[in-house]
Image (cartoon, helix red, strand yellow):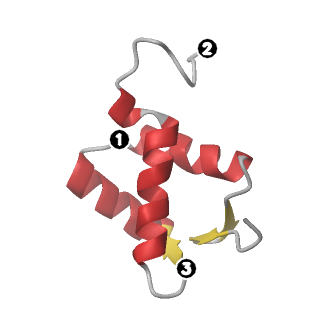
Amino acid sequence: MANLFTKDEDLMKSAPFIGSEILKQIQSSDDGRISIFDLAKNLRKTNKITARSIYYGMLFLYCLDIVEFDEPYLIKNVKN
């Protein structure tokens, strides 16, 4: 089974770093939400991030209750 965090991992592809990049994308949007497809396209284009890293970043933010999902959008949780 693959580990979510390892000591040999490139920090630029870690879930917390990708999570911060996702939050930057959400904050730069006008209405506080972004399509997961647009998010993936922007992150893969600018940072050369894999789909798996984006998935782990979204999962990390969801587990911390920072974002919510409303298909197909990723929405910043207003309570936090």
Report the residue marked by disc 3: 32
Is residue 66 shown left or right of residue 72? right
Which residue occupies 49% across, 74% down? 34
* SS under mark 3: loop
Furthest-right residue in view? Answer: 79
Q: Residue at x 47, y 73 (%)?
A: 27
Marks 1 and 3: CB-CB under 8 Å?
A: no
Vertical relation: 59 (above or below) 41: above
Kindly check if marks 1 and 2 are in contact, taking CB atoms under 8 A apart as contact: no
Which quarter of the image is occupied by the N terminus? top right
Q: Secondary structure at mark 2?
A: loop
Q: How many marks?
A: 3
Instruction: Tell whether 59 sits left or right of 5.
Output: right
C-beta proximity under 8 Å, tags 2 and 3: no
Q: Position of residue 28 (x, y in %)?
A: 40, 76
Tell me which numbered mark, 1 or 3, is placed earlier along the sequence.
3
Q: Within 10 Å of the Cα at label 1, are there few (<14), some (14-19), or many (20+) other Cα atoms? A: few
Residue 41: x, y in percent?
32, 62
Determine whether 1 is above or below 47 in the image: above
Q: Which residue is mark 2?
A: 1
Q: CA distance from mark 2 to mark 3?
A: 35 Å
Determine the image quadrant of residue 40: bottom left
Dot 3, how many residues are within 10 Å of its Cα: few (below 14), some (14-19), or many (20+)? some
Q: Which mark is residue 50?
A: 1
Dot placed on the residue nearer the N-terminal end, 1 or 2: 2
Q: CA distance from mark 1 to mark 3?
A: 24 Å
Q: Which three-letter amino acid code belongs to the residue tagged 2?
A: Met
